[in-house]
Image (cartoon, rainbow, N blue to C red):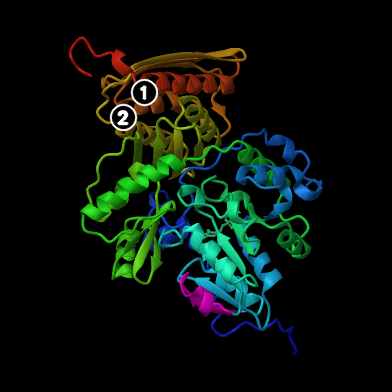
Amino acid sequence: MMSPTPRPLPDSFAAYIWTETAQDVARRRGLDPAAVIRFDANVPPLPGVPRIPIGESFARLNEYPPGGYRELHAAAASYVGTRPEQIVLGAGSDSLIHLVARTYLGVGRTAAVVDLPTYSLYGIASQIEGGEVVGCSLEDAPEAAAQAAVIWICNPHNPTGSVYRCEDIVALAKRRPESLVAIDEAYVEYGAESMVPYLDEVPNCIVLRTLSKAFGFAALRVGYAVCAPEVASELRKRSEPAPISSPSARIVAAALREPRLDVEETVQERSRVREALLAAGYDCPPSAGNFLLLRVEKADQLADELEAKGLVLRRYRNGLRFTVRLPAENDRLLEALGVAAAPSARRTGLVVRTTAETGVRVSLALDGQGRARIDTGVGFLDHLLTLFAFHGGIDLELLAGGDLEVDEHHTVEDVLAALGEALAQALGARTGLSRYGSATVPMDEASGTAAVDLGSRPHAEVALAFTGDRVGGLALSLLPHALERFAMQGRFTLHVEASGKDDHHVAEAAFKALGRALAGACASAGTQAITSTKGEA
Ligand code: PMP
């Protein structure tokens, strides 16, 4: 039987391969999924926070996005300092890479990729369009890429993290005015100079940007290209009409108008980790991205050893690339590499606990923005911990997989115990803290009060006056004991009480008050540090 014939691909073509999920790695390695830490994806450890009420966008799911995404064009243009007609939108910079290839490449045309191996999609998109792909360096590009319709440059370079100077890119673009020079600035926020201000001088350049990296919105799939209006209009002719969903467009426009990125923390942490690796004799070149490259000969063997411990890195022939995550998480990796690092100034904690009944991973950063990614399998517990993190100003990632088919008992208790352990880790020696904190939070008819003393004397008094047995999937009788475990493992004194007519509000008030009380106690006391009259900190 005849079958449809696709356009041919060259023999050398290798399709893009998605990395395995944490669940896949866990299954293959016989680990608990909560024990797997992904250092391979180059996304920040914590998600971006939508700065707009998102319910509104979800109330109009039957409608197409507003024509032309005017708001998002304006926000992206003002973020990079250009005009809206110079912006082209795509579903991630991946779709813009394909759009550039669709617009400028085809059978009989050549694409040059600077410094292979690099991000594989440049070659993939070029070959799909029928283009031939050649490798070159920035220095030999004018000759090697003499016929190239497109020259792909990743700046900062993935996976080495090195940067190209804009003046060198400008010089190349001027020598090859008939080539489109595409500069992928996916990681530019972490430390490279942008080519955007040079676009008037070299209108044959196009800059590709993404919301997936420094902004923490990879799941929303938004990218934008910045280029001369003439290039933009050629791209738009070949673009799909509405590449971005309305909720994504709204969240991202707000984020671009008021960017709040974790770049400074990541850059500091990148130096701390790199210095530790260099001191231990590893070959680790300087990086301007949110990742580092470890140059090692037996990369596969080392990657396997690390993966067996749940640490997943990206493999290259002579190296391993890993994303800079939170300090406590990076310390895990360094420890597995036999490297001792200087302590981070940031207060973070990481606890991975696996028992016969549950697997729990808690990663927290005090002094955060109250961001939470919580998935315990018990919806109402996720909700309470999200409120706790928000009101405590704690960035919290908490994943748990427990024996919920039995009941939620072990999960609830182990989650709070691990949270306490992570908190104790983050607090370290507990010097210079306010030490005491308290808060009362009303929730309609309910009210909750919490008081905390971080003076390392574990004790809990919990009085939650519930009128029923359950809220959603959570048996309320489990909360007092779980909060006791939290205080014991966290080594602090905790008093919580809450009452009201609606159990949902009672529990919410208690967890909000707990977050606020802890935030107060964990705050730096400056010169006013209260110490115990018995001489303990
Ligand atoms: N460019 C580079 C250099 C990347 O490393 C990545 C991430 N894999 C992308 C683009 C893709 O970004 P996006 O999520 O915007 O498609």
Q: Earlier in the sequence, mark 2 or mark 1?
A: 2
Q: Amino acid at mark 2?
A: Leu
Task: Spot the residue most to the left.
Answer: 535
Residue 439 image offset from top left, x and y in percent: 46, 14
Is label 1 within 8 A of ligand 1 (CB to nearest ligand atom)?
no
- Secondary element at image label 1: helix
Image location of residue 207, percent across then percent down: 60, 58
In the rendered structure, the answer to whether residue 71 lies left or right of residue 314 reads right
Mark 2 CB within 8 Å of ligand 1: no
Asked if labels 1 and 2 touch by Cβ distance under 8 angstroms, the answer is yes
- Residue 305 percent across, percent down from the top left: 30, 62
Residue tagged 1: 522
Q: In this rendering, would 317 be left or right of 179?
A: left
Left or right of 224: which side holds 506? left
The tally of labels here is: 2
Q: Which residue is mark 2?
A: 427
- Would you say residue 141 sits in the magenta stretch? yes
The residue most toward the top is 533
Q: Where does ligand 1 appear, by image quarter?
A: bottom right
**Quadrant placement of the N terminus:** bottom right
| Front residue of 189 and 12 | 189
Q: Residue at x 57, y 28 (%)?
A: 471
Q: Quadrant of residue 255?
A: top right
Q: Is residue 207 visible?
A: yes
User: What separation in Å lies between label 2 and label 1 (alpha carbons)?
Assistant: 8 Å
Three-letter amino acid code of the residue under disc 1 = Cys
**For residue 533, above or below residue 347:** above
Magenta segment range? 132-146
The one nearer the camera, 66 or 55, is 66
Does the stretch in magenta take in 326? no
Does residue 376 sit above or below 313 in this rendering? above
Foreground pick, 112 / 307: 112
